[in-house]
Image: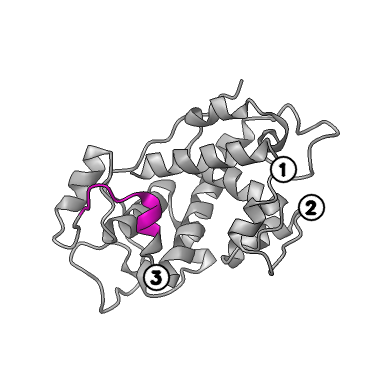
Amino acid sequence: MLSFKRLFPVAALAATLTLAAPLQAAPGEKYPQTKTRLLKGRETRKLENEQAQYAINEIYARHGLLFGDMKLRKQFLRFKWYRPEPGLSAEDARKRFNSYEKRNVERLALARESEIGAEQDDYVSPYKTGSQGLVGERFPETRLDKYFGIEIESMSEAQLQYALNEIYARHGFNFDDMDLRKHFLKLGWYKPKPDLSRQQVAATFSNIERPIANALAEQLDWRRN
């Protein structure tokens, strides 16, 4: 049985990046840089877990996501630019992201995953030390255990994202985000296939991976809605 500590959406006030705010900054925006340029690795690594989550939430808020968490919703409702749209899914909100926002969400999620690395290391996969585990693989259960899905609700948002990315990495998805790509390139089994789209890679998932990947994505959408 997995024993992950659940991480809920962050509604606390987060400190800003120590960067000059661009002209396009809206009143109250803490991380306007996420819509105007790519954040550098050294910048995301300086962020605390709560700061990275706030930056991700702010990107979704810009595009009208109606947060299920009331504290989070009220926090953004203070700003005139936040215009929540009932019925808008996290997936639909993502379709509105500009190219910088899409890649910055990936970078910020990776920063959060690194921040909770100690929490992940507390969990030792029963497959990790056996012959079935790949070197450096954190969630081999997602390809070996068809019952893994029952544990998903107890995972943190960052763990959900990492597990989903790891499934795609196994099948050679060529991540747009260079930091994410470099992270998996350190693992000998990651063989990126630039000619394959996300949908084409997903079509190669095994019968165990496919429902687990869907469950991970659905849980992520539910947390962000």
Asked whether the viewer can see residue 139, the reply is: no
Residue at 22% x, 40% y is: 71
Q: x%, y% of residue 49?
A: 44, 47
Pointer 1 with pointer 3, Cβ within 8 A = no
Looking at the rendered structure, the kind of residue marked 1 is: Glu
Q: Which residues are magenta?
A: 84-94
State which quarter of the image contains the N terminus.
Answer: top right
- Between marks 1 and 2, how big is the CA–CA gap? 9 Å
Task: Name which quarter of the figure residue 27 lies in.
Answer: bottom left
Q: Which residue is mark 1?
A: 137
Q: Residues within 10 Å of mark 3 (few under 14, many from 20)?
A: few
- Give the SS element for disc 3: loop
- Between marks 3 and 2, how big is the CA–CA gap? 31 Å
Residue found at the very far bottom of the displayed protein: 23
Asked whether the viewer can see residue 72, the reply is: yes
- The disc, 1 or 2, on the residue closer to the chain's N-terminal end is 1
The mark found on residue 156 in the picture is: none
Residue at 79% x, 44% y is: 135
Task: Name which quarter of the figure residue 68 lies in.
Answer: top left
Residue 185 lies in the magenta-colored region: no
Is label 1 or label 3 in front? 3
Task: Name which quarter of the figure residue 80 lies in.
Answer: bottom left
Q: x%, y% of residue 91?
A: 40, 53
Q: Which residue is mark 3?
A: 98
Q: Is residue 137 left or right of residue 38?
A: right
- The disc, 3 or 2, on the residue closer to the chain's N-terminal end is 3
Residue at 39% x, 39% y is: 222
Residue at 49% x, 49% y is: 112
- The disc, 1 or 3, on the residue closer to the chain's N-terminal end is 3
Pointer 1 with pointer 2, Cβ within 8 A = yes
